[in-house]
Image (cartoon, rainbow, N blue to C red):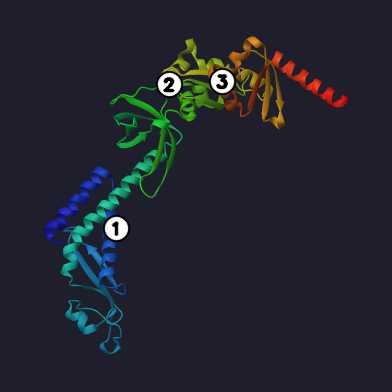
Amino acid sequence: MKSKDGKIFLEALEQLEKEKGINKESLLEAVEQAMLAAYKKHYGEEENVEVEINRSTGEVKVFEIKTVVTAEDLYDAALEVSVEDAVEAGHKRVKVGDVIKLEVNCEEFRRNAIQNGKQIVIQKVREAERQNIFDKFKVKEHDIITGIIRRIDEKRNIFIEFDGCEAILTTAEQSPADVYRVGERIKVYVAEVEKTNKFPKIVISRKNEGLLKKLFELEIPEIADGIIEIKSVAREAGSRAKVAVYSADENIDTVGACIGQKGLRIRNIVNELNGEKIDIVVWKEDVEEFVSAVLSPAKVISVEVLEEGSTARVLVENSQLSLAIGKNGQNARLAAKLTGMRVDIKTVDSFKAETENNTVDLDEEENA
């Protein structure tokens, strides 16, 4: 590596250190190791050598590492050097047993060193950038971050910048209620961050239930402080959600605290989610009571837990059936998701008719 090229190379590394935060010394050490591997591949793995880059000039030198022996004891010229030859090479005060470095004249290797060095640095910079991106997002996994929309592609994927890094909000993770505009600030939930062989896998979402949970923590101090606990969340993004909350302190109005004075707290969350309706339900340890509460605003007559706790049979008046099921079955779906049970909603009349039919069938079997 010529002196001029070497200095330009060092200056480029210094610039990288300032702009990317990549340690210059670690890059130089990586380049030296890669050049050593390249040298051995070309000249032979048995070579006992070192590659050094001068930290001031950038000049590349290759040194053989040899042990000083007497001329009579010289056995392996690749690993040993006689006292006389060592002195002739400039090591005036050597003695038997010393380990010395002898510069190797390899002009062809040195001519290619600068180009090899550039490629290695490019690779290391990419690796460092990927690690930097992974580190920045990993600490925010399962949390909310705020970024700026930089562009929207033809597939409606949203490219968002966060603290100098970019992540993609895919169409699969977007809420139907959202409208995206380039230049606007946006909150997203970091659902998953994983290392891969190439670029880190980063899943950000406006659809994930974790976004709603974190918004509750941001807006409601009692939740952030642990006074109120979010037991479960069920959400159909952009349309409706149900949140079950609980407090061990009986003096706390859990629903009132979540709604806030004049509805301010819940309104802020609804506005962030662009009008998504949110039902807040008090979590109950009694499953039947909880299922009944979750089906609000419908009025429930009774709840019976069946099939080892996996199904809840709910009875309502005829007039309450459509309310309990909800538009397109949404209320029942959210209730099932929130409770973790199959919710079977029936009217009193249909259940009575079903029961009577079963009784008739049994009577006929007995008479037969």
Q: Amino acid at mark 1?
A: Ala
Find disc 3 in the rendering and name its residue.
329
Across and down, in percent, residue 63 comes to 23, 70
Residue mark closest to the camera, 2 vs 1: 2
Tag 1 secondary structure: helix
Question: Is 171 displayed left or right of 71 in the figure?
Answer: right
Find disc 2 in the rendering and name its residue.
273
Q: Earlier in the sequence, mark 2 or mark 3?
A: 2
Q: Nearer the viewer, residue 179 or 107?
A: 179
**Cα gap from disc 2 to disc 3, whole angstroms:** 22 Å
Question: Is 361 displayed left or right of 315 in the figure?
Answer: right
Question: Is 88 displayed left or right of 352 in the figure?
Answer: left
Residue 267: quadrant of the picture: top left
Q: Amino acid at mark 2?
A: Leu
Q: Quadrant of the C terminus?
A: top right
Tag 2 secondary structure: loop
Q: Residue furthest right?
A: 367
Q: Amino acid at mark 3?
A: Gly
Q: Residue at x 64, y 12 (%)?
A: 299
Across and down, in percent, residue 336 comes to 60, 26
Find disc 1 in the rendering and name its residue.
30
Q: Earlier in the sequence, mark 3 or mark 1?
A: 1
Across and down, in percent, residue 240 comes to 50, 20
Q: Residue at x 63, y 28 (%)?
A: 341
Q: Nearer the viewer, residue 124 or 202?
A: 202
User: Compared to 219, does 318 lie above or below?
Assistant: above
